[in-house]
Image (tube, rainbow, N blue to C red):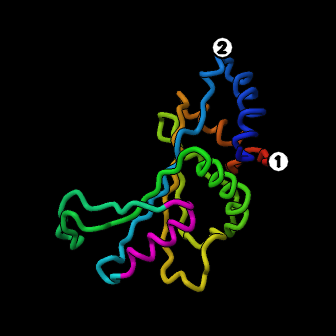
Amino acid sequence: MSRLKERYKNQVKTELQKKFGYKNVMQVPRVLKIVINMGIAEIAKDKNALQDTLEELALIAGQRPVTTRAKKSISNFKLRQGMPIGAKVTLRGRRMYDFMDRFFNITCPIIRDFRGFEKGTDGSGNCTIGLDDQTVFSELDLDKVKLTKGMNITFVTNAESDDECIELLRQLGMPYKNMEIVLAS
């Protein structure tokens, strides 16, 4: 079992149940999946940009990404329907917990001038954060990275409210601004 999943089962579940007053253990929110999304704006200029992005995202996530394609043509962006415009990975289960553990405990402290994440929730219990640079992940070989690209990381939970989602992620180890940080042990 993953270290973070074990922590969730033993500590976080009981603390959330006490804090929010759940009557049933099944009401306690949990992380369902993590979606990592990278857009590729340089695809028109560089033919290898898509392949490089797929390789980098596979190293970061530990799983092969899927190419996302344009749904409709937009002439101002020189975009045609069906053209590849990005890559995404959906993590579940053990890979999800392993990624969260690496992200919270290894990657976040490496980010330059990092003070914590803003509360980027969507109103229905999901949290999305954006990174400007993919080179903060220690899995990447910096000599092979040609272009710096940003990415969105979405934590999809079954929490009913944003407060429950934020508390769940904070208990798991996500560093938020102006909140005490719970270190994963």
Q: Amino acid at mark 2?
A: Lys
Q: Secondary structure at mark 1?
A: loop
Q: Amino acid at mark 1?
A: Ser
The residue carrying mark 1 is 185
Q: Secondary structure at mark 2?
A: loop
Residue at the farthest right position: 185
Identify which residue is drawn at 56% across, 61% down.
Answer: 62
Contact? badges 2 and 1 (CB < 8 Å)? no
At label 1, counting other C-alpha atoms closer than 10 Å, the crowd grade (few under 14, some 14-19, many 20 or more) is: few
Quadrant of the rendering where the N terminus is positioned:
top right
What residue range appears in magenta? 48-63
Q: Locate residue 39 relative to residue 13 in the image: left or right.
A: left
Main secondary structure along the magenta-highlighted residues: helix
Q: Nearer the viewer, residue 150 or 61?
A: 61
The percent position of residue 131, horizontal first and vertical second, equals: 55, 63
Q: How many marks?
A: 2
Locate residue 9: give its quadrant.
top right
The residue carrying mark 2 is 23
Identify which residue is drawn at 58% across, 44% down.
Answer: 93
Q: On screen, 176 above or below 17?
A: below
Q: Locate residue 30 relative to residue 148 in the image: left or right.
A: right
Residue at the farthest top position: 23
At label 2, counting other C-alpha atoms closer than 10 Å, the crowd grade (few under 14, some 14-19, many 20 or more) is: few
Identify which residue is drawn at 69% across, 52% down.
Answer: 101
Q: On screen, 123 above or below 35?
A: above
The percent position of residue 130, horizontal first and vertical second, equals: 52, 58
